[in-house]
Image (cartoon, rainbow, N blue to C red):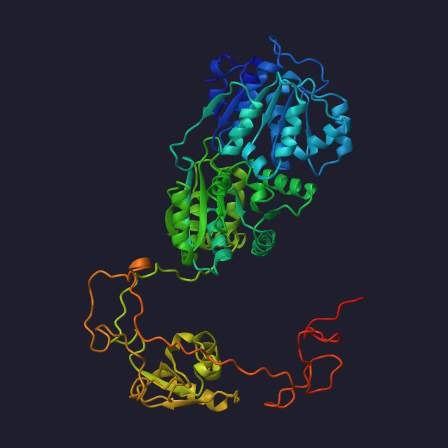
Amino acid sequence: MLPENLPALLSQALAERGYTDLTGVQVAVSEPAALGRDLLVSSKTGSGKTVAYGIAMAQELLSEAGALPPAAAPLALIIAPTRELALQVQRELEWLYAKTGARVVSCVGGMDPRREQRALSAGAHIVVGTPGRLRDHLERSNLDLSAIRVAVLDEADEMLDLGFREELEALLDEAPATRRTLLFSATLPKPILALARRYQSDAYSISIADGGKGHADIEYLAVSIAPSDVEHATVNLLRFFEPGSAIVFCSTREAVRRLHANLVERGFSAVALSGELTQNERANALQSLRDRRARVCVATDVAARGIDIPDLELVIHAELPHDPQVLQHRSGRTGRAGRKGISAILVPHPRRRRAEGFLRTANVQATWRSAPSAEDIRAKDQERLIAELKPDGEVVEDDLAIARVLLSGELPEVVVASLIRSHRASLPSPEDLVETRPEPPQQPMDRDKPRPGFEDTAWYSMDIGRNRNAEARWLLPMICRRGHITKLEIGAIRIFDRETRFEIVRKVQERFDASLAESPDDGVHITPLADPDAPVKRDRAGFGRPGEKSEKRPPQRRDGPRHDEPRHDGPRQHAPRGNDAPRYEGPRLDTPRPAAPRHDGPRQDRPPSGGGFKGKPKGSRPSFNADGPPKDFQPRGKPPKRP
């Protein structure tokens, strides 16, 4: 039952729309404790927040008789982060306030601003828009906020994430201080709480808790796939569930373009939705989904907030979201208004551990499974076809006439088989997937036993080693290219100073030898090796290798005492210092050292060095006496000073 304190005209609109009960957030905003107060509402995506604040602001907009004053300066301002959400809010409020005669005007980017200006000049009761376009109309004096009674911030956390703080503050500062401020958000991070403290007074907090878990109406699936099977797994999920409508989320615009083209090529009625599209293209794509002309939407995260597509049953995350909140808002496109939905996350098996940690952080209990195979899809198609063609007891005479014509002269089985073939021809074909198996637990390596599959091998030697910067990462592709084998057929690679040895499985040895004989010489010679433990060429340092005894060995660490001195294990005794230090009592050298004779002439003990002093011939050096250096002396390496 609808609450009795709702305005009569809104109750009639809700009843005609099929509302028999309100959601939790809609009931909470209509309680007596919330009437007339600022609201700080935290509720999960898809809980009916638009109708909730439509109900909450009715007290300020409608008179006791349920009527509205003539349209003039707007009475309510609703700010949304994206164009799609703003236009959706406009449509919701139009049917909710249709019986009151309310005039709802939208101001969003991508639309004609002159048409919006004319609509504002004609008068409006409610204005819905995006922050940038609303501020633009405010600065151009097209938007008058002097009569605002209610200001609503829808998806406030998303607007702050998109960098609209300055626009929000400009709009709220311009509105009257006596207004009600309703702040709705799926999450309440610290920036949202700071914004609420600044622009709200004695706010009534409403939190629709979900127990810290994911959306109760959404079934989460974690689908393990091979890294190359993202597109094929998407096709098979769409075919297996056959949803009325679905959204596939990608992280980049390029990924959206590629996946959308592949789905269309396979026969799906799909549209793309990304930030590079114009407003008209995005509006046409969403309208195609609402009209059922398209069933699949391939989108970036720009469509993750606020987009309401009727009967959206399946959300596919083609790429793992980078944030738990992104996962929540993506998945929140389905499972809305009490309907059930499926959120499938494609996880390449090398990234499974990361995905498990991500799901734990997001408090999501997901069921792990493999992607549907072609056999699974054919079995599902058979179930759906039998249920669809099974007689329900109601037969039309025209249909019986066509059936008699088809059955005349033909066996019933042949006719039914033809109908089934015609039905399957309209369905996209399922894809064959790479078989994925869970990674086996790593076993400790037994170095005494060969690797599985390398019990019988042949060894080869290459005349290249560390002296030519040999590394396995570039030796491996060279061996594959020269011998026409794969890396799975190559075993151990041992790199020495001037030689490299490697093994291959015995079954490809004949092909390997034939390919080596035909391959061009690239400066590296590969020859068979009879004994892999045979002595190797001596290294630069002279240390030996397996099978060779070296005369030189690296110095070993001594664990015992040095030389023959006893090892001292007690506390270290520091030498005395200062006055307590012992003085040297040995013999002294009292004989003074004779002074060296002074030499003022040119040096004769070495050949001339080529000069270095300006104005003197090579081989001569100036003499420095008591009168100082000569006037033309310049130090070497320093430029002369300018006069």
Residue 169 visible in the snapshot: yes
The reply, left or right, for residue 552 in relation to residue 600 is: left
User: What is the residue that sits farthest to the front in this orientation?
Assistant: 591
The x, y position of residue 222, in whole percent, is 41, 49
User: What is the residue that sits farthest to the top in this orientation?
Assistant: 64
Would you place residue 20 above or below residue 371 in this image? above
Residue at image x 44%, y 81%?
466
Would you place residue 126 above or below residue 216 in this image? above
Q: In which quadrant will I find the N terminus? A: top left
Q: In which quadrant will I find the C terminus? A: bottom right
Residue at image x 59%, y 25%?
152
Q: Pick the residue in front: 412 or 3.
A: 3
The x, y position of residue 57, in whole percent, is 58, 19
Would you place residue 439 above or below residue 283 in this image? below
Q: How many marks?
A: 0
The x, y position of residue 614, in whole percent, is 74, 79
Residue at image x 22%, y 73%?
561
Q: Pick the residue in front: 285 or 353.
A: 353
Q: Residue 542 falls in which quadrant of the image?
A: bottom left
